Structure formats: structure tokens, C-alpha cells
Amino acid sequence: MTMIETTMTETGPNASGYKDFSIGGFTFSRDEYFATITWPTGSHQMDIGQWLRCVQRDVAWGFFYGIVNFDAVIGTMNHYGNVDMFAGRFNEAYRRAEVDYNENFDHDELMSCFTAMLSDWTNEGYDPFAAPMETGSAYGPSRGENDMAVTRKRVVAQRMVGVPGDEPIRSDESGFPINRGFADVPQDEPVISAEPGYEDQVCSFNLFAYLSRSDVTWNPSVVSACKESLYCPTTEEFILPVIHGNDRVEWFVQLSDEIQWDVEDRDTGAKRARVVMRAGDVAAMPADIRHQGYAPKRSMLLVWENGSPRIPEMIANGEAPVHPVDF
Ligand code: PHB
Ligand code: FE
């Protein structure tokens, strides 16, 4: 794959007050309802709220693991340092018609384009990370901004949550109130009875109480790391905006309520499974699928991931499995 020299350009504002953006062969424009994307062999439209929710996650996650499909046509594929933006690449019909398109960008360059677009296209009162019931409207002519929300950083614990020096978002004083969907979650902290002499070495915390204060949806945050093993719990409501194409196995532990998952073949989009997960259910999502989740009510999900950058290569070499369990 060759890297094309590109620079992002911005023009406008257009009649709705929004700037147009372009990078490489892609152009992006928004009007009151839609994002319109063009590339040399085609064009595509998406609901602007849906577009902003996808771009927000792609930016916040640094293009994430593997593939982030914004829908069945548009998305990005992370090569960890550089990144592909594509149209129709993982869509059998687009490929057959030979209108699919892929372009490779330097990580920082595509990131700058997305960050500028997110800032310009997000209106005052709309938060792409929030559940639809907890935020304003994405639609209409350009109206102020919400940079506070769109530049929000994922909460990364400085140490394991609960040990001295962690990032304390576990009280009302933290500015993170208990979410309306978790009003029934007990807030008591565990009682520790350490052997004398070990009092400062044993820590614990109430993960449910901690997550009940999360103000974002579909945004896994690292709460503990043991070498490459990352515990990334998250709170979910409505629809995971992106259809994530895995490049490694990931484990899901449904901590509360219910999420339904549509699981498809990563490359063609052919349906593979529908997974209904209720509190206590555990699933291993294979490395060769793409999936999108639906949460009718705010729920808690633990995503358990191996963050090693070697995993895609190990899978390609047959050193690591595509699915972790054989039944
Ligand atoms: C996933 O793609 O595995 C994923 C992404 C975001 C979430 C949950 C799961 O909030
Ligand atoms: Fe995933």
C-alpha cells in the first residue's frame, strides 16, 4: 500500500453555515439533515446525527482496533500509525460494481480532518457521546458549538480504580451524578478486612457504583491493565453508532440489563449471528466479525481485550486463534 501525500482543506461556510472538508479523494459536506461524502467513483449520505456519533468515536478511540464502519459503506481501518478511509470496501455489491474506494492516510492527518469537522459540524446543545434522550438535536442550520463535549477525553484510570491515586469519579462532588438509568444501583463500597500489616496493600471498589456515574454511552474506558489485558467497561444505551470490525477476539461480560448484538461477516456483511446478552452472560466475539449492539435501556458491559499490537499479525500467522473456544 502506498501512502499518498495529502493535505486537508476546508472551505465555506455553505448556505447552512457549515464548512466543507476534503482530504485526498474524499469530500465531506453537511446540510441541515445529512452528511454527504464523495469519492472518485461515488457518493453517499448519512443522517448527520449518526455521522457525528461515528466520527466522535473514531476520533476518541484513535481509530480503535481494526475496522470502524460508520455504516455498510463508509469507514476506517486502523494500521496503527496510518489509517485507511474507505467506501464500499466491505460491501459485496460495491465491490462487484467496482465503485469501492480506499485511500491510506497518515494517522494525524485524517485525525485533524475529523477533529475539525466534528468541531464545525456539532451544534450547541448536541453531544454525540450522549444517549439521544439525554442531549439536544444534531439537526438544523449551524448554531454555536459544543467543543467541551467533542474534545472530552476518555477517562483512563491513573492506577487501578480504588487504589490511592486513582482518578476519583466516585462521588457527587466529582461532577458525575448517578445516571437516571442506574438510580437503583447500590452505592456502598466494599468492606476490606486486611491482615495486620497489609492494610495499605489491599484495595477494592464498587465497579457498579463507578459505572453508574458514566456520562457517555458506547465508550469503553480502561479501568485496569494487567500487562496487555485490559478491562474496559462501558455504559450503553440506544445503538452502538459504529459497526466494529474486530481484528482480535474480544470478550463481553454483560454486567447489567440487556444488549442485543447483530454479528456479521467482517468482509461481506453477511449475517452470522444475533446474540442476546442478559446480565451475567459472557460471549467471546470472534476476530473475523463485525458487530453492532442495541441497548433498549442503559446497561453495563465489560469489554475485555488483549491490547497487544502483535495480535493481528499473530492471527495472520496462525499463532493466535480467530475464536478462542472450540465447542
Ligand atoms: C466493540 O466493538 O466491541 C464495542 C465498541 C464499543 C462499545 C462496546 C463494544 O461500547
Ligand atoms: Fe468489537
Image: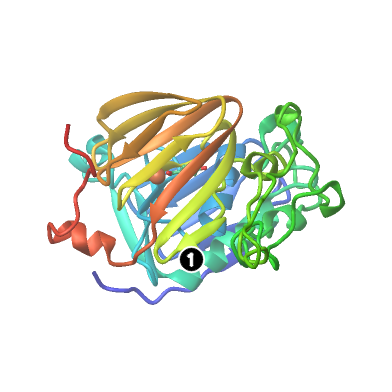
Left or right: 140 in relation to 5: right
Q: Is residue 106 above or below residue 281?
A: below
Query: Dividing the image into 4 quarters, which one contains the N terminus?
Result: bottom left
Circle 1 Cα neighbour tier, 10 Å, few/some/many (<14 / 14–19 / ≥20)? many
Closer to the camera, 295 or 243? 295
- Residue at (52, 69) in percent of width and height: 8
Q: Position of residue 319 (x, y in %)?
A: 15, 59
Residue 50 in the image, given as x and y percentages of width and height: 56, 38
Q: Quadrant of residue 190?
A: top right
Mark 1: amino acid: Leu
Q: Quadrant of residue 203?
A: bottom right
Whether residue 132 is visible here, answered yes or no, is: yes
In the rendered view, would you say 154 is above or below 44? below
Q: Residue 197 at what x, y percent from top left? A: 64, 68
Left of 191 or right of it: where is 51?
left
User: Residue beneath label 1, please?
Assistant: 110
Q: Residue furthest right?
A: 173
The residue at the point 13 percent across, 61 percent down is: 317
Left or right of 6 on screen, residue 160: right
Residue at the extreme left:
318
Q: Quadrant of the C terminus?
A: top left
Which residue is nearer to you in this view: 59 or 174? 174
Q: Position of residue 168 (x, y in %)?
A: 74, 58
Q: Secondary structure at mark 1?
A: helix
